[in-house]
Amino acid sequence: MNAQNSRSLEVHGLSVSLGGSEILDRVSFDVRAGQVVGLIGPNGAGKSTAIRAILDIVKAHSGVISVDGQDVGVLAPRERAKRLAYVPQGAPVHWPLTAERIVALGRTPHLNPWQELGAHDRAVVREVMETTDCWSMRDRIVTTLSGGERSRVLLARAMAVQAPYLLADEPTASLDPLHQLQVMEIMRSIAATGVGVLIVVHDLSHALRYCDQLVLLTGGKVLASGTPDDVLTDGNLEAAFGVKVSRWSEGGEQFLAPHKAKAAS
């Protein structure tokens, strides 16, 4: 096994309670370098909470989270920010800054206090904004952008960190179909550089086509994990989502779509 493939973000026995309710119950999975791992499941299954617990935004009451063999809990905030980049779901942006300035914040973990961006930092900012199709809006105030435009800017900000792991909570939400596909392609291209990508996905066809591994959560527990073919079975989808799906192939690619709700018992 080469050094890249041996790197991983590992979650073991993660349990989280919020407001007296158990949201996650002994959840375990890992994200290996170069893989796209999708967290799927119905609303309220604990997908976003899992990502927020990995980032220490919410506190786990049990479990171990490690990045390349090191306990995330002992990392200083700046070091954690260098290793784990984060794309939040529908996060509001209150600062009246240009889109380019927002993306440049992704370079902050690599700079000393009050240090100006260098030529390399500026080149990274332009590259990620071009990749996410938002360079043309670089001079616009981010609070004037649409939800979809803002989502692409926040993705670019996370990419600007150049962290070995990228965690994205529904990065395709609010995006039109073209930009949804572009974002999923970006996730694949990021993984191809050796980055481990953990992404919350609601579109089951995207999960099938773009993810290497899936973790299906329901009721705060792992119902199934493994390859998309192993996880997206008729039985698992009916048990987790209460739906039946249609499947088809086109151009050598597989697709699926829910088409019928399970009859109420």
Image: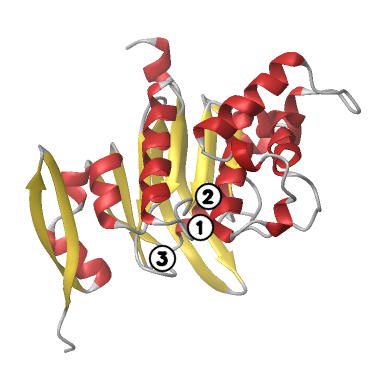
Residue 45, numbered circle: 3
Mark 2, secondary structure of its residue: helix
Which residue bears the numbered disc 1? 48
Q: At 48% across and 50% down in the image, what residue appears?
A: 171
User: With respect to residue 155, does 90 lie above or below?
Assistant: below
Q: What's the coloring here?
A: secondary structure
Q: Upstream in the sequence, badge 3 or badge 2?
A: 3
Callout 2: few (<14), some (14-19), or many (20+) C-alpha neighbours within 10 Å? many
Three-letter residue code for mark 2: Ile
Q: Is residue 82 left or right of residue 203?
A: right
In the picture, measured across the screen, residue 71 lies left or right of residue 108, that is left
Quarter of the image that includes the C terminus = bottom left
Query: Few, some or many C-alpha atoms within 10 Å of disc 1 (few <14, some 14-19, many ≥20)?
Result: some
In front: 83, or 182?
182
Can residue 162 be seen in this snapshot?
Answer: no
Relative vertical location of residue 136 with respect to residue 90 in this rendering, above or below: above
Along the viewing direction, whichever of 256 and 86 lies nearer the viewer: 256
- What residue does disc 2 label? 51
